[in-house]
Amino acid sequence: MLSVLRVHLPSEIPVVGCEITPYVLLRRPDGTISNDDVPESAPFNGYCIRYKWYRDQSDQKVSVCSVHPTEQATLQCIVCVKEKVPIAKSYHCSPKCFTDAWQHHRSLHEQAKRTVKENGIEEEETFGRFNNSGSGSHNASLSSATITVGSSVLNNGPVPIYSTTVAERNETRIPMGNVHTILTSRVIPAPSPTPRRMIQVNGADAMGHLDVDGRSASSKTFSVLSYNILSDTYATSETYSYCPSWALSWPYRRQNLLREIIGYHADIVCLQEVQNDHFEEFFAPELDKHGYQALFKRRTSEVYSGNPTLVDGCATFFRRDRFSQVKKYEVEFNKAAQSLTDQGIAAGQKRAALTRLIKDNIALIVVLESKFGNHGIDNPGKRRLLCVANTHVNVHHECMDVKLWQVHTLLKGLEKIAISADIPMLVCGDFNTVPGSAPHSLLARGKVDPLHPDLAVDPYGILRLTNKLSHQLPLVSAYSSFARMGGVAPGVEQQRRRMDPATNEPLFTNCTRDFVGTVDYIFYTADSLMVESLLELLDEESLRKDTAIPSPQWSSDHIALLAQFRCKHRTRR
């Protein structure tokens, strides 16, 4: 029969709404050791593994801090109680915690007032799903959970989680072998990321919010989200040792990310570092429930030789009620590298040049047709098309020639689409390049200065083969609008302080313990689109309270970028 050698949990702190799958090491009847699951649906020689959880009722129920869920609450906001804000959000662990969170905590009061005026629309719908258990902090668990492997039953607070047991698969399912029990820490409610506000940048200087249903205020606009969500493959405790293990685990991060993404209610969503299996098993089906159609392009695997389901890629989603798909293009930079070396690299250097160029990076390009109004486009009878490129230029900083070549290759491909279709364009993604670098200059200025220091590294003459490092697309960085906007409103000044005046880009979009800088962008063709509003930037100080990101609040080491656009009159390029 099967026997249990060891039972281990990925985290000792259970979180409401997050599945915990125990790691169970088994000895099979033939003496071999395995950690493969043996579910009741696929028994081994009549035996299977069952997981069960028990709620430890001996622990006293207490309230926990809404900002630091591992801390016990010592004070409660009375205004929250009066305005009927979900009770779990009203608790804080200290006066300093409450003071630090006040700016965004106050928005909960305003949100609650609007909710009442909108006929009682549930707060969870505004901030996304999985915000909390729905029953306040008292019911949000605040007691420990026990897993028993051997013969057991499991309940993680008010949210059921799965449990295991070795049992003989027959009518009575008799438990076999010794009982293995693990006592966890107190179950905590999932932390809620502070809602980020939309800042109007065209025609007004006031701060605004998404509508109650999260949609843009005007049907004549559309919004685009770009977000590197941090692949689970890269989210290791060695790299992000400052992040608690429970907050770094994929079951927790996926729900936190989903809640955040849904809460933005973007019409188009461009995600990077999406694992293949996570796209198929989680993001595609979950976002489908919210009206999104999904597209995915996995990175190629000439360099990577591991499990293909763990390879990450780019995923683009769009609302079916706002857009329909016209055409999809998949760019594989490995193929372009092969073509380049075949045509222009000396025979003795081809292999070395190809090795340098091949990085398994890709881009996903989709042409969409809008289903909403004409929005000022010149010809009412003309199809209202939009081209969206989503990419992740995952190249080490020492290979700047390769990074610049990939960006140039993508832009030249987009140029061909623009000439053939004459449509507005968006270029989104993680380019792993900071403002002022040669790739950024090519994107934002349309050319690279021949004396740019980044051009000094080109051991195989790759850049010389690209003819001219330029393009004709009138691309502008969406977030540079913050630097150009007028007005003296407090919110506007706050955003300006989070911009680099030398580059007109955010001070950072990636914030880890070892690196802080901007590598993510949303570029748009300025002759056909105009920015209406932008998602507010975060300040580094607030993130440093948890050392860096990812953290319990923010589940990626990047921050999301969101821009709202409007089409405008223009002449043909």
Image (cartoon, grey):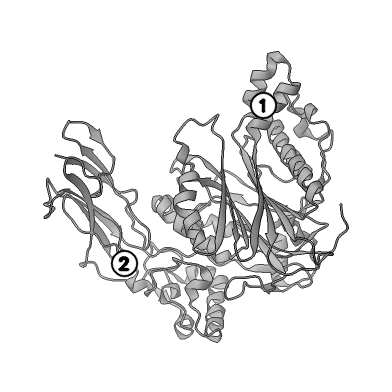
Q: Residues within 10 Å of mark 1 (few under 14, many from 20)?
A: some
Discs 1/2, front: 1
Element carrying mark 1: helix
Say which quarter of the image contains residue 339. top right
Say which quarter of the image contains residue 563. bottom right
Q: Amino acid at mark 2?
A: Leu
- Asked whether residue 243 is in view, the answer is no
Q: Residue furthest front?
A: 381
Say which quarter of the image contains residue 462. top right
Residue 286, image x, y percentages: 47, 59
Residue 43, image x, y percentages: 21, 44
The answer to whether residue 172 is left or right of residue 308 is: left
Write down the residue under mark 1. Answer: 338
Q: Is residue 531 above or below residue 305?
A: below
Residue 111, image x, y percentages: 55, 78
- Name the image quarter holding the N terminus: top left
The answer to whether residue 8 is left or right of residue 324 is: left
The answer to whether residue 540 is left or right of residue 184 is: right
Q: Is residue 3 above or below residue 72?
A: above
The circle on residue 142 is 2
Q: Is residue 391 above or below residue 122?
A: above
The answer to whether residue 46 is left or right of residue 189 is: left
Q: Give yes or no for contact between labels 1 and 2 (Cβ–Cβ under 8 Å).
A: no
Residue 177, image x, y percentages: 12, 45
Element carrying mark 2: loop
- The residue located at (80%, 27%) in the rendering is 464
Q: Residues within 10 Å of mark 2 (few under 14, many from 20)?
A: many
Q: Nearer the viewer, residue 75 or 229?
A: 229
Q: Amino acid at mark 1?
A: Gln
Q: Nearer the viewer, residue 449 or 347?
A: 347
- Asked whether residue 471 is in view, the answer is yes
